[in-house]
Image (spheres, rainbow, N blue to C red):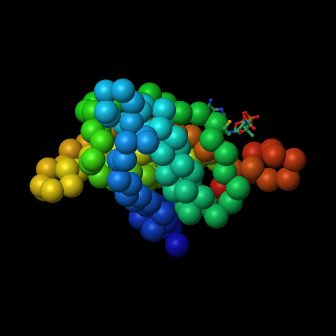
């Protein structure tokens, strides 16, 4: 399988209902919760791409463009954007959807870098 096919196959989409236990006192999704969901989505994407042990080494700028109200549905969409020697980058977009209309827009996006590690937790080549 070539890199392009692996990128397609490892693209990871996760849906969540935004229930009140994940929101802040403005009744919108707490930013830290959004970042945790993004890192998890990125981790799953990186792992499904490489099928190796991956650790987060860096997160790039995360833009919170739109609020995500309680009572909506979010889709996290993770896909590999760069493959290096021992590292790769995953972009994660969060889309917010209203439950009872077709309204949908991009709310948050960011990029995460992962490193493949082997024995002794040292970086190893991405195969
Ligand atoms: C990941 C880890 C093993 C990398 O070790 P390291 O000695 O820094 O690795 P290197 O300097 O050899 O770099 C390895 C790769 O990571 C990339 N990298 C390292 N630091 C980076 C950073 N801050 N941002 C982006 N890429 C980075 C390098 O460019 C290199 O990529 P390449 O091989 O594709 O060219 C080490 O930093 C570590 O264990 N970090 C903790 C990871 C962790 O526990 N994460 C969970 C969250 S707390």
Coordinates of residue 88 in the picture (x, y in percent) = 57, 47
Q: Indicate whether 68 appears above or below 14.
A: above
Which of the two residues, 67 or 122, is positioned nearer the viewer here?
67
Coordinates of residue 84 in the picture (x, y in percent) = 59, 46
Q: Indicate whether 92 appears above or below 99.
A: above
Residue at coordinates 25% horizontally, 42% vertically from top-left?
106
Residue at coordinates 21% horizontally, 55% vertically from top-left?
99
Residue at coordinates 51% horizontally, 56% vertically from top-left?
45
Coordinates of residue 98 in the picture (x, y in percent) = 20, 50
Q: Is residue 73 left or right of residue 2?
A: left
Residue 109 seen from this side: no
Q: Is residue 116 left or right of residue 48?
A: right
Quadrant holding ligand 1?
Answer: top right
Which of the two residues, 43 or 23, is positioned nearer the viewer here?
23
Which of the two residues, 43 or 24, is positioned nearer the viewer here?
24
Which of the two residues, 26 or 83, is positioned nearer the viewer here?
26
Q: Is residue 2 left or right of residue 93?
A: right
- Residue furthest right as drawn: 120
Q: Indicate whether 57 appears above or below 120.
A: above
Residue at coordinates 81% horizontally, 46% vertically from top-left?
121
State which quarter of the image contains the C terminus. Answer: bottom right
Coordinates of residue 44 in the picture (x, y in percent) = 55, 56
């Amino acid at each position: 399988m070539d890199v392009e096919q692996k990128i397609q196959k490892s693209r990871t989409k996760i849906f969540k209902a935004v229930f009140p236990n994940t929101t802040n006192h403005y009744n919108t999704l707490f930013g830290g919760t959004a970042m945790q969901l993004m890192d998890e989505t990125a981790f799953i994407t990186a792992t499904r791409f490489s099928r190796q042990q991956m650790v987060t080494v860096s997160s790039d700028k995360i833009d919170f463009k739109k609020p995500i109200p309680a009572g909506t549905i979010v889709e996290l969409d993770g896909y590999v954007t760069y493959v290096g020697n021992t590292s790769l980058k995953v972009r994660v977009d969060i889309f917010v959807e209203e439950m009872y209309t077709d309204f949908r827009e991009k709310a948050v996006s960011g990029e995460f870098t992962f490193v493949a590690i082997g024995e002794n937790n040292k970086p190893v080549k991405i195969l």
